[in-house]
């Protein structure tokens, strides 16, 4: 194989389908774009030689050809689409409902959805979007994007750059829009040219041959948008590294100061107050009656501290660096971090006070003690000699499937205790079980009981603290993508050729989109001249 | 009159405007004789003016409701779906101004009306916003998505017109079966609107009680219960006894009531469909086909493709980019694989595949029209099934 010299004198690279200069179909290559079977020429890449269609010997050639095929690209997109659908059949692991009886994925899917749920879980579909094969699929789309764009961009760029106004007759007559006219005067041609120029066509003329072209830049739209997509994929990879992405979730109780995990003890957050408001506007009365309470505000008033450790090992000194409130939809920034209001827990118990009473006569009170529920002691001794030992503590009490007491979480939302009560000078304890609304004498022989005398409650705020330095890259990628699609979709590349040929005038036109638009413009341009309106040679209507 | 009644009157006016406009668009295509040309032009102008007037009325609905509730009315099923209907009309107006195709009005406006009627079956009172929705990005995101979907909706309408035009109705084929099936689904929506309106007018109510986790909850049916909630007991007296229970694998809030509504829609829609078949004595597709005789298939194919090329960037901007910005501000994560988000991505993949397929030969015409129909099917799936059935952050109603 060698370079191909066309009869117009232009030398084309191997694999060219339509001469880069005059457009004459190059014999022997027409199968590449499927022109041999059709009357109309495939104008997709102006019949340029593309590497993928030209070389098919080595392994690399084959890989290149594979990934640059639009067919393969579409298959990859369709596969990603189907895979994405699979992930929505049942909830993903992070969306298992909070109120599910058991949120352990190993149990949840089977319990909720039976055998299909079990299969779903075992195939790993409950974490589908972070699975290796889903990521491979997306990566393959990325590879395909790069290769197919490289395969086409340069040849197309070159071909559009060196095109000549004079085209071969075969090229013209095999365009979708084509007409032949006789008795066209020079004045008419001049008029047409002026009208086209007025419609902002760029006109190139050579020996009476005319090329009117506009919107060529829109041909680069797809390449621009693909670059945007590549940047987004790169940003997604960057985001997996700790340099670019950091996220921690902290629960902070009202009045408490908690270190922000992952910051090496550098930052602390104090929760001054958590505010939970509900809507009570008169105008919403009807809706509120139907839906019940609707929250209107989640807010945490907080102080962020930076810890200065003057000497290694010394207690850190907390310096307030920010005092503000964070609300849903109004995140808060400090240093390189952003804080989001992400969760809350209302009315958690902070402390409970118990009174020791005579079992049959609650009036008879032997004193009381207070348990700090986040930090309970193991034993409480009263001045009068009573001793109470905490045998079991269930911060969030419930009975599990086997009827055994257990704690659902580590948060004191429904505290319950098994107490060992040692009356003064006794060695054998009385056992009692106390919780909210529960007071059980396990043996039935107790003389004393413990009554809840008082308690304090507080709210807990769930804050996520993060930075994401990949965001600008996503932003740039998305912006480039949008520019590319708009460039490619809202403008069209239109070309009109007018060539005198043996006393006739041949007019052909091509656009990559919006044939209606170019026809309208041709109509305007040739109005009241002897030039015949182009005929639409597309086969759609003909076949139906 | 207070603002809210102005608002709802305006919406009725808009609906009525679209209805009238449809008739006038219909009148334009009946006259084929050339001496009627002037008359046709008049009809055309009236039809288009009525459409624009309807749109303006709907704009009045939108603005007054915004003022009354204090937030952009795009925050629940009623508001969003109504807005989608409005976006479809806007997309029609834009494309009509360019292509001047009267047939388009005859098909696009009824679809828009079906969508608006469907919307008004959901609770229409103004409701307050939960904290996550209190963001300007909500409005920006939702309105842009709806606009994109409206433009893509035109490609569905035109794709359907294309299929009705070119499908061979002289014998039974797979294609005319599926085409008829798509039309049948439109009838189901009409059935849903008809049956819901009927029983709403009668103030029908039946209450069920069932347990959910550890709580006992009640649900109110506004249609006679054919399917009870799973494990539910009827507590209203003197109403129809349910025939069976909703299977347990129906998920989501109020699954029983929604399933019951679905059954009723199928019954009512099927009856209307069968009645239409009896009247016309042929497939609905075959009945409509002659109307499209004078239009070029090529032009339909092109409009269908163009509305995808115009709608795709708008959808990408609203459904993915603005959505991500909002999610980043609200939750600190711009993408969370929530079912609604995933289905937006699926929609995007689908139309990307469509655009690439259109680059090659052999994917124009019928195949492409089917893709346009399926694409809008995916959009509707995301709007209806994902919202009402799959649990997630975005579940509205
Ligand atoms: C989800 C991923 C992708 C998106 C969103 C996307 C988007 C687009 C868009 C919007 C266009 C313009 C279409 C038009 O103007 O009609 C386009 C063109 C194109 N895309 Fe993609 N694309 C994706 C993946 C791919 C892949 C994997 C390939 C690889 C085969 C590919 C190959 C092409 C080609 C060859 C063009 C035409 C270029 C031209 O007209 O010169 N795309 N793409």
Image (cartoon, rainbow, N blue to C red):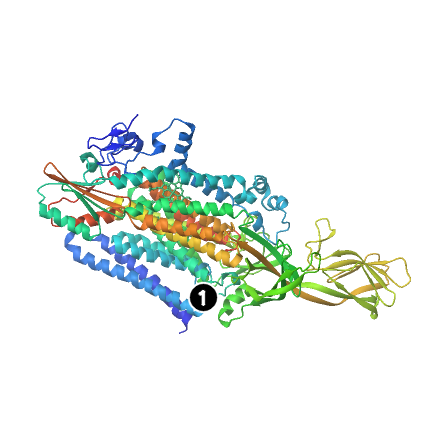
Residue B326 lies, in percent from the top left, at 47, 57
A317 lies left or right of A157: right
- Dot 1: few (<14), some (14–19), or many (≥20) neighbours within 10 Å? many
| Residue at the spot 36% in from the left edge and 37% down from the top edge | A151
For ligand 1, tell me if the residue under mark 1 lies within 8 Å.
no
Q: Secondary structure at mark 1?
A: loop
Q: Residue furthest bottom?
A: B1
Q: Is residue A281 above or below residue B24?
A: below
Q: Quadrant of residue A539?
A: top left
Camera sees residue B11: yes
Quadrant containing ligand 1 reads top left
In which quadrant is the C terminus of chain A drawn? top left
Q: Nearer the viewer, residue A483 or A135?
A: A483
Q: Is residue A398 above or below residue A57?
A: below
Q: Nearer the viewer, residue A85 or A255?
A: A255
Q: How many marks?
A: 1
| Residue at the spot 58% in from the left edge and 45% down from the top edge | A113
Residue A277 lies, in percent from the top left, at 57, 67
The residue singled out by tag 1 in the image is: B71
Q: Is residue B79 above or below residue B287?
A: below
Residue A95 lies, in percent from the top left, at 56, 51
In which quadrant is the N terminus of chain A drawn? top left
């Amino acid at each position: 194989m060698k370079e191909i010299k066309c009869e117009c004198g232009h030398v084309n690279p191997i694999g060219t389908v339509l001469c880069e200069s005059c457009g004459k179909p190059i014999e022997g290559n027409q199968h590449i774009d499927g022109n041999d079977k059709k009357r109309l020429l495939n104008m997709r890449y102006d019949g340029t030689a593309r590497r993928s269609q030209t070389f098919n010997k080595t392994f690399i050639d084959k890989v290149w050809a594979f990934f640059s095929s639009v067919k393969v690209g579409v298959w990859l997109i369709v596969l990603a689409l189907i895979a994405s659908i699979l992930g929505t059949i049942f909830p993903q692991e992070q969306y298992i409902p909070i109120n599910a009886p058991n949120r352990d994925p190993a149990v949840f899917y089977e319990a909720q959805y039976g055998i299909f749920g079990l299969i779903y879980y075992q195939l790993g579909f409950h974490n589908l979007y972070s699975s290796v094969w889903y990521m491979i699929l997306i990566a393959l789309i990325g590879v395909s994007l790069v290769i197919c764009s490289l395969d086409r961009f340069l040849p197309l760029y070159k071909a559009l750059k060196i095109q000549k106004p004079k085209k071969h007759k075969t090229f013209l007559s095999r365009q979708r829009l084509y007409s032949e006219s006789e008795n066209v005067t020079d004045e008419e041609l001049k008029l047409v040219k002026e009208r086209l120029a007025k419609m902002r066509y760029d006109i190139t003329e050579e020996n009476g041959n005319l090329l009117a072209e506009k919107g060529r830049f829109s041909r680069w739209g797809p390449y621009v948008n693909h670059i945007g997509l590549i940047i987004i994929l790169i940003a997604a990879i960057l985001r997996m590294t700790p340099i670019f992405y950091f996220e921690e979730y902290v629960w902070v109780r009202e009045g408490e100061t908690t270190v922000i995990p992952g910051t090496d003890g550098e930052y602390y957050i104090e929760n001054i107050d958590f505010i939970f408001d509900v809507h009570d506007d008169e105008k919403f009365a009807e809706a509120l009656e139907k839906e019940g309470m609707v929250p209107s505000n989640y807010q945490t008033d907080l102080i962020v501290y930076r810890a200065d450790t003057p000497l290694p090992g010394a207690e850190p000194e907390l310096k307030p660096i920010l005092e503000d409130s964070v609300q849903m939809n109004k995140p808060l920034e400090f240093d390189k971090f952003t804080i989001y209001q992400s969760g809350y827990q209302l009315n958690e118990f902070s402390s409970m006070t118990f009174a020791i009473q005579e079992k049959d006569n609650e009036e008879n009170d032997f004193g009381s003690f207070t348990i700090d529920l986040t930090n309970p002691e193991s034993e409480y001794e009263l001045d009068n000699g009573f001793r109470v030992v905490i045998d079991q503590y269930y911060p969030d009490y419930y009975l599990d499937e086997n009827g055994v007491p257990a704690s659902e979480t580590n948060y004191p939302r429904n505290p319950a205790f098994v107490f060992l009560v040692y009356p003064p000078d006794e060695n054998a304890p009385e056992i009692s079980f106390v919780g909210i609304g529960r007071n059980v004498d396990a043996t039935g022989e107790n003389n004393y009981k413990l009554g809840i005398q008082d308690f304090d409650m507080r709210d807990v705020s769930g804050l996520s603290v993060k930075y994401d330095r990949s965001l600008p890259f996503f932003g740039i990628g998305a912006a480039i993508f949008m520019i590319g699609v708009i460039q490619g979709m809202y403008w069209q590349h239109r070309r009109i050729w007018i060539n005198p040929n043996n006393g006739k005038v041949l007019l052909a036109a091509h656009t990559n989109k919006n044939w209606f638009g170019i026809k309208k413009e041709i109509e305007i341009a040739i109005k009241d001249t002897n030039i015949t309106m182009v005929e639409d040679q597309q086969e759609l209507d003909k076949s139906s | 009159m207070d603002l809210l009644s102005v608002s709802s009157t305006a919406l009725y006016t808009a609906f009525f405007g679209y209805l009238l406009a449809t008739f006038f668009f219909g009148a334009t295509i009946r006259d084929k004789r050339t001496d009627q040309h002037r008359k046709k032009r008049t009809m055309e102008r009236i039809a288009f003016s009525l459409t624009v007037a309807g749109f303006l009325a709907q704009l009045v609905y939108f603005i007054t409701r915004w003022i009354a509730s204090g937030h952009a009315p795009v925050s629940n099923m009623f508001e969003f779906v109504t807005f989608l209907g409005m976006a479809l009309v806007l997309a029609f107006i834009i494309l009509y101004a360019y292509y001047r195709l009267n047939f388009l009005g005859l098909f696009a406006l009824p679809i828009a009306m079906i969508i608006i009627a469907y919307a008004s079956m959901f609770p229409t009172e103004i409701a307050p916003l939960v904290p996550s929705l209190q963001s300007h990005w909500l409005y920006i995101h939702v309105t842009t998505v709806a606009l994109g979907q409206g433009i893509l909706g035109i490609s569905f309408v035109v794709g359907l017109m294309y299929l009705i035009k070119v499908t061979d109705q002289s014998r039974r084929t797979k294609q005319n079966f599926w085409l008829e099936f798509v039309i049948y689904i439109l009838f189901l929506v009409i059935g849903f609107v008809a049956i819901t309106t009927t029983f709403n007018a009668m103030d029908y109510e039946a209450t069920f009680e069932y347990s959910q986790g550890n709580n006992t909850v009640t649900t109110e049916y506004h249609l006679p219960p054919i399917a009870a909630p799973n494990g539910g007991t009827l507590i209203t007296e003197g109403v129809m006894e349910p025939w069976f229970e909703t299977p347990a694998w129906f998920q989501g809030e109020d699954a029983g009531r929604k399933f019951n509504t679905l059954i009723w829609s199928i019954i009512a829609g099927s009856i209307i469909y069968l009645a239409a078949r009896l009247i016309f004595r042929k497939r609905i597709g075959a009945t409509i086909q002659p109307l499209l005789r004078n239009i070029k298939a090529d032009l339909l194919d092109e409009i269908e493709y163009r509305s995808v090329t115009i709608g795709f960037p708008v959808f990408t901007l609203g459904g993915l980019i603005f959505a991500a910005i909002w999610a980043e501000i609200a939750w600190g994560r711009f993408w969370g694989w929530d079912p609604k988000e995933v289905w937006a991505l699926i929609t995007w993949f689908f139309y990307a595949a469509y655009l690439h397929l259109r680059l090659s030969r052999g994917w124009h015409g019928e195949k492409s029209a089917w893709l346009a129909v399926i694409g809008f099917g995916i959009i509707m799936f995301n709007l209806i099934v994902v919202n009402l059935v799959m649990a997630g952050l975005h579940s509205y109603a």
